[in-house]
Amino acid sequence: MKNIFKTFALMMCLAAMLSACKGTSTKPLLPNVSGKAGEVVVVIDKTAWDGALGTLVRENLACDCPYLPFREPLYSLVNVAPRAFTNIFQIHRNIIIFNIDPQLTKEGIKLRNDVWARPQAVIQINAFDNESAVKIATENMAKIIAFVEQAERDRVIANAKLYEERALRPQVMEIFGGSPVFPIGYQLKKKTSDFVWIGYETTFVYQDILIYKYPATRSEADFSAKNIIDNRNRTLKENVPGMFENTYMTTGTFMEPEVTYMKYKGRDFAQTRGLWEVENDYMGGPFVSPSFYSPDGQDIIVVEAFVYAPKYEKRQYLRQTESLLYSFEWAAVKENQK
């Protein structure tokens, strides 16, 4: 008798589950994206690729990546003819499609996610002819680059959250009230009352993050290039020694650092890009450091990514480490999301 009741209960549960599934729409399962990080497939015929339209794309997406010791393109481009744009390319991570057809009813640009794969960024430009395509692409180039950049950044952050080194974030939050996400492999190298150094290091590559703070004056001078660099050099001299005596990290002077003022997810900050070097030594590489006020406005918080990879190209190492900075969350925000 007990077995009969158990079987009946099981059948009722299955019926309820099947009933709940009816009428609900489910998206088809998508494959994972393919392709290398920092790579963009551009779907365009050879004539347009060799002409003004292709030149425009290359000048903007394959221009020199800023503030690297040696020339590297902002993105690596792969040209694919429309007739060759089959399944193998449709699951690529970043795709720009130029749909040029005089029979179109409307011109414009579409930004879409997860069309053929996940997580995917697809940009489609519809135009009557090549001249119109150039005009549309020119007007929207900043939007195109930002869309691809955000997609690359989101992939790194999502992976970091999935494989997080959970012991690190609480230690950073304890000092600064907020923290980025650190994936497995990152380790705490130094911690003081106003400075934390966390790094992922292999034999020939260092991908490190520095978080530090200093008092704010609540004046325009807080985010001036001079104030940012002066405080950076002071902090690094005190906390980031070189390999030998009387050596320490500082800001390189070969290329003057650039400070840009930005907004990301409602947060205003000053982003500094430049090259670092070691005083009295020959080590160096690129860095990027957003600076912003603490919630009470009493301090300036700096979250910096720097890379040392003397044997390799550095674009992807820096982009990967920089992306982690954008995962920064205040402790109160993280608590509210639970």
Image (cartoon, grey):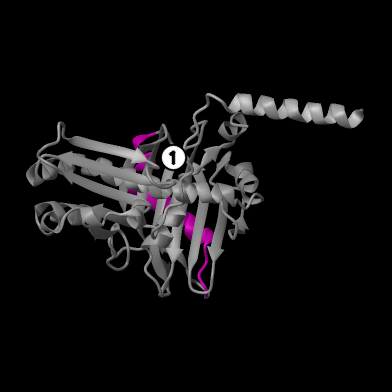
Secondary structure under the numbered disc 1 in the rendered image: strand
- Position of residue 121 in the picture relative to residue 163 (left or right): left
- Position of residue 13 in the picture relative to residue 151 (left or right): right
The residue wearing badge 1 is 292
Image position, residue 104 (x, y; %): 14, 35
Q: Which residues are magenta?
A: 219-243
Image position, residue 338 (x, y; %): 63, 32
Find out whether residue 20 is within the magenta segment: no
Q: Main secondary structure of the magenta part?
A: helix
Q: Amino acid at mark 1?
A: Phe
Q: Residue at x 19, y 53 (%)?
A: 44
Viewer-side residue, 281 vs 172 = 172
Q: Can the viewer see residue 233 in this picture?
A: no
Q: Name the image quarter holding residue 127.
A: top left
Q: Is residue 143 above or below residue 272?
A: above
Image position, residue 257 (x, y; %): 31, 55
Q: Residue at x 42, y 34 (%)?
A: 265
Viewer-side residue, 176 vs 57 = 57
Q: Can the viewer see residue 207 in this picture?
A: yes
Q: Is residue 58 above or below residue 21?
A: below
Disc 1 crowd, CA 10 A, few/some/many (<14, 14-19, 20+)? many
Q: Is residue 70 above or below residue 151?
A: below
- Position of residue 221 in the picture relative to residue 119 (left or right): left
Q: Residue at x 18, y 55 (%)?
A: 59
